């Protein structure tokens, strides 16, 4: 059978979202040289994924190649290339790893200093249109560094790629967020909902998100934990540490619902790196 590439999946999703029928797509693919068995398999896979019922129990299909640290033999520390990173806590489902000593104090300060003058009210991706919008659930200020924008960003991105065994250019630009007292980010998922009409546009830049790394640059005096409501986990925002979690499908079955609890006193600064299926452009 002919292989079903990520690009073909995205094309089918886009055509379905635009209102084209499955028979019309089948005819187009047949005219382009696709065999009937491969065409039927590709269309069926995307239809099931879009409905969210492709797997057992109504789950969308899962990826097999995923970012993440090598935790074979339960290591206490990991080599991230230029830094020895501590493994503080792990959860198997969802796949969550809390890292200690991922960033130095100087790196935290450098990111904050470089970001401070470029902050604006944080936006979220708008899956209705593929653009960005203000969201009442997200009350932080933020900015993005371009990938490799400066020496500190380059160093940290290379470290993340080594630690999580994922190509550097599969990552989005580093986002810096500041949460003042009362600011929060209510529970949400980081993947892009296949059912939303803007998702095919978003996916053209690098495919689906498959992992998130939240790094803590400055601790608040109180509050500000990263919460995972589905499993009752709260990760304290300790400076220099980070929490990583991955999601092998765009489905709530991943149990990756998460949020930023309100900051009760002081300011919390974080840096977030989202990982995509392939090269992010």
Image: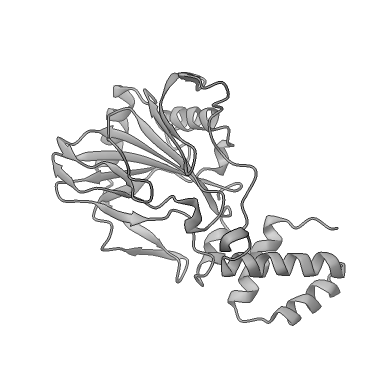
Q: Position of residue 220 (x, y in %)?
A: 18, 36
Q: Is residue 274 above or below residue 112?
A: below
Is 77 left, or right, of 176 in this rendering? right
Q: Is residue 126 above or below residue 163?
A: below
Q: Residue at x 68, y 59 (%)?
A: 7
Q: Nearer the viewer, residue 91 or 146?
A: 91
Residue 188 visible, this orientation: yes
Is 276 left, or right, of 54 in this rendering? left
Residue 208: which quarter of the image? Answer: bottom right
Q: Position of residue 280 (x, y in %)?
A: 56, 48
> Which corner quadrant holds the N terminus?
bottom right
Q: Nearer the viewer, residue 87 or 175?
A: 87
Q: Is residue 192 above or below residue 233?
A: below
Q: Position of residue 72 (x, y in %)?
A: 58, 24
Is 131 left, or right, of 9 in this rendering? left
Q: Residue at x 47, y 58 (%)?
A: 252
Residue 215: which quarter of the image? Answer: top left
Q: Position of residue 141 (x, y in %)?
A: 25, 50
Residue 28: which quarter of the image? Answer: bottom right
Q: Residue at x 26, y 39 (%)?
A: 269
Is 277 left, or right, of 252 in this rendering? right
Residue 60 visible, this orientation: no
Q: Residue furthest left?
A: 265
Q: Residue at x 23, y 42 (%)?
A: 224
Q: Is residue 184 above or below residue 240?
A: below
Q: How is the image coloured?
A: one colour
């Amino acid at each position: 059978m002919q292989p079903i590439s990520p690009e073909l999946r995205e094309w089918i999703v886009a055509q379905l979202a635009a209102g084209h029928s499955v028979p019309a797509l089948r005819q187009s693919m047949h005219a382009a040289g696709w065999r009937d068995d491969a065409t039927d398999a590709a269309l069926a896979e995307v239809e099931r994924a879009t409905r969210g019922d492709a797997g057992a129990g109504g789950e969308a299909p899962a990826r097999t190649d995923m970012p993440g640290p090598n935790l074979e033999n339960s290591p206490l520390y990991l080599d991230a290339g230029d830094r020895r990173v501590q493994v503080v806590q792990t959860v198997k489902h969802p796949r969550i790893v809390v890292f200690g000593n991922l960033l130095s104090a100087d790196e935290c300060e450098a990111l904050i200093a470089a970001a401070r003058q470029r902050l604006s009210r944080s936006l979220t991706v708008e899956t209705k249109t593929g653009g960005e919008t203000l969201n009442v659930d997200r009350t932080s200020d933020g900015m993005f560094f371009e990938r490799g924008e400066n020496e500190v960003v380059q160093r940290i991105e290379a470290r993340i790629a080594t630690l999580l065994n994922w190509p550097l250019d599969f990552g989005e630009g580093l986002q810096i967020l500041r949460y003042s007292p009362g600011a929060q980010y209510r529970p949400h998922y980081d993947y892009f909902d296949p059912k939303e009409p803007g998702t095919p546009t978003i996916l053209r830049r690098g495919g689906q998100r498959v992992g998130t790394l939240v790094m803590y640059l400055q601790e608040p005096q109180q509050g500000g934990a990263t919460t995972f409501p589905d499993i009752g986990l709260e990760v304290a925002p300790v400076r220099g540490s980070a929490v990583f979690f991955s999601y092998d499908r765009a489905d709530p079955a991943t149990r990756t619902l998460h949020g930023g609890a309100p900051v009760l006193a002081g300011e919390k600064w974080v840096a977030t790196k989202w990982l995509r299926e392939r090269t992010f452009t």
